[in-house]
Amino acid sequence: MSNSSSIRHFLLLALADTRQLQLLHFCLLLGISLVALLANGLIISAVACGHHLHTPMFFFLLNLALSDLGFICTTVPKAMHNSLWDTRNISYTGCAAQLFSFMFFISAEYFVLSIMCYDRYVSICKPLHYGTLLGSRACAHMAAAAWASAFLNALMHTASTFSLPLCHGNALGQFFCEIPQILKLSCSKSYLRELGVLAFSGCLGVGCFVFIVFSYVQIFRAVLRIPTEQGRHKAFSTSLPHLAVVSLFVSTVMFAHLKPPSMSSSSLDLALSVLYSVVPPALNPLIYSLRNQELKAEVWRLVTGCFQKH
């Protein structure tokens, strides 16, 4: 039996048992992270450099790309290191830093997606008030509120989780430091405070989810009332990428954490955790770029311009 003061490191879950599979996982993670870094970097550069993209929708997309970059850089580098060097260790402070970063960027992603939903709602349901409701100052305030809320949420969870006495070893059943896995190591009945913080965050998350669902009900009702097919297609083309990204993110997170215990298995849990912590940052920019002609054109102009200079 050990307590948290004697723990100097944690043991993360190995992605594979054999050396060949470890190297395969390293290559896969490297490929996914490079795609995510390149795609999100291109979106950030395109929005920053393209003056005609300085609109609320693309401003929030830039914030989403920033959260995706942070998201992929939180869990993947350590997993790649462990796969390449055949180790499972992460230091106590490294685990705390990873947990804080993970909660910060996953919260920021969710809050930014909620704000983007509001942007789509105002654009389609209240187009005459778009400039008033989503002026530059209002957009900056909403983005700042999203990042500040994410920071406070991550700080509360990290402080609450790592103040617990740990009595059940140091092996985590996950390839990165995650709250449920650390709670499993805590002493009996000592994690009620963290459960209270989780309940608060859960209520906040459910509130955002209800807002997103309500907004899309109003959006689809407004789109179906548009008389021309071209108008409906244009409205759908700006909303469907956001809906696809939200669905991918929310469904994987909810299924991973709310599935019945009878469905739990180490391989399924590992696959689901990869789905919501590694895949979205690589897929999100591709979903938006494929559906948005303005963004696609600006990214193409940026890429071709770089090649012409060289």
Image: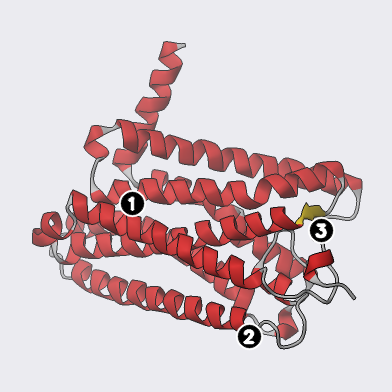
Label 2 near label 1: C-beta < 8 Å? no
Spatial CA span between label 1 and label 3: 40 Å
Q: Secondary structure at mark 1?
A: helix
Left or right position of 98 against 285: right
- CA separation, marks 3 and 2? 24 Å
1 or 2: tag closer to the N-terminus? 1
Image location (x, y in percent) of residue 149: 41, 64
Q: Which residue is mark 1?
A: 60
Q: Amino acid at mark 3?
A: Arg
Residue drawn at x 55%, y 83% as measured from the top left = 196
Q: Position of residue 207 (x, y in %)?
A: 39, 78
Q: Which mark is residue 211?
A: none
Indicate the amino acid at tag 1: Phe
Q: Quadrant of residue 143?
A: bottom left
Secondary structure beneath label 3: loop
User: Which of pointers 3 and 2 lies earlier in the amino acid sequence?
Assistant: 3
- The residue identified by callout 3 is 8
Q: Quadrant of residue 159?
A: bottom right
Quadrant housing the N terminus: bottom right
Distance between the Cα atoms at labels 1 and 2? 36 Å
- Crowd tier of the residue under label 3, counting other residues whose Cα lies within 10 Å: few below 14, some 14–19, many 20 or above: few
> Looking at the image, do the residues carrying marks 3 and 2 touch, with CB atoms under 8 Å apart?
no
Q: Residue at x 57, y 69 (%)?
A: 157
Q: Which residue is mark 2?
A: 192
Considering only order in the chain, which callout, 3 or 1, is on the residue closer to the N terminus?
Answer: 3
Callout 2 environment at 10 Å: few (<14), some (14 to 19), or many (20+)?
Answer: few
Residue type at numbered disc 2: Leu
